[in-house]
Image (cartoon, rainbow, N blue to C red):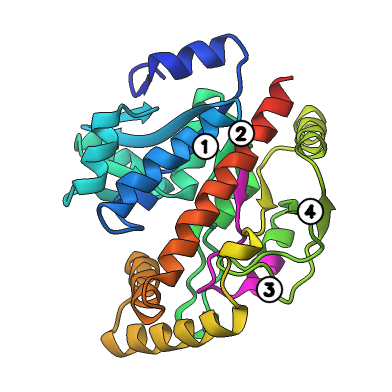
Amino acid sequence: MSDYIDIAPEVAEALASGKPVVALESTIISHGMPYPQNLETAQAVEQDVRDNGAIPATIAVIGGRCKIGLSPEELEYFAKGTDILKLSRRDIPYCIAKKRDGATTVSATMILAEKAGIRVFATGGIGGVHRDLAGNFDVSADLTELGKTSVAVVCAGAKAILDIPKTLEHLETLGVPVIAYGTDEFPAFYSVESGHKAPLRLDSPEDLAAFLKSKWEFGLEGGAVIGNPPEADKALAREAIEGAIDDALAEAQKKGIHGRDVTPFLLAHVTQLTEGKSLEANIALVRNNARLGAKIAVAMAG
């Protein structure tokens, strides 16, 4: 894969020596948050991984080269860049062939992480089944990727703008294990509770590492969703965020926004309606997931 992939020296050394590594996505930097919060969050998340004993590997494509681990200058470039593609599985070949710059979503980050030999990936929330599925049939490629790519995704559940019960049903159909960390309920991104019971519960990074090890050693390919609830003092009340989401969905429908543009529009609109509280919660939950991801990677390496 050296014709396509560049692994940062620190990440390559860690992988070669069996040290824990945590993959991080880049779409959250280029498309998920405004500047300068996006850069500050990316830097803080990488530091959170280091503080918990693992090496961070933020993943992106630059000039058609798949990068596993970004320099401080490259992080800043993605935070400020305006001509950066948003990459899912289908977009990676185009970005490589045209030598473009691209930020990886959950699905693309999983693919490149697996190719580099990284098993744990921490992010904010996964994509899933959108609300009003009958009207738009919008199902994220993240779910299909989780069914085939052997990377564990540590997240605060599915993004709150999605249909959580349908997302859980789709993951079950694909054979993807869904584990809630330290709780019986699947988290709802900004909120601790979703009103939906998680299929599985585990209460320590060591138990999660043992689960993943047994899954993959037994030959069961595909990923796993580890739902890590946001810290209670930094989470938002479920009722309050639902009202903002309903307003954002109505606005998106009125403006005819669809496809890959829906999620960033809705998240930005919810941030506006909550006067920035949802952005603060988003940053906190991403950092919380990075810390747990590092602890799982450390347990797996040990």
Q: State left or right for residue 192 relative to residue 40.
A: right
- For label 1, count other residues whose C-alpha is less than 10 Å away and answer few (under 14), some (14-19) or many (20+): many
Q: State the image coordinates of residue 116 (x, y, percent, origin top left).
A: 50, 24
Q: In the image shown, does 44 or 99 lie closer to the viewer?
A: 44
Question: Which mark is in front, 3 or 1?
Answer: 1
Position of the C terminus, as image quadrant, is top right
- Residue 230 horizontal/vertical position (percent): 62, 59
Secondary element under disc 1, as helix, strand or loop, is helix
Magenta stretch bounds = 151-169
Q: Are marks 2 and 3 in contact (CB under 8 Å)?
A: no
Magenta stretch holds residue 300: no
Q: Are marks 1 and 2 in contact (CB under 8 Å)?
A: yes
- The residue indicated by pointer 1 is 48
Q: Can I make out residue 57 in this image? A: yes
Q: Which mark is residue 182?
A: 4
Distance from label 3 to label 1 (Cα)?
26 Å
Give the residue furthest to the front: 233
Mark sitting earlier along the chain (3/1): 1
Q: Is residue 239 above or below residue 90?
A: below
Q: CA distance from mark 2 to mark 3?
A: 25 Å
Q: Residues within 10 Å of mark 4 (few under 14, many from 20)?
A: few
- The label on residue 294 is 2
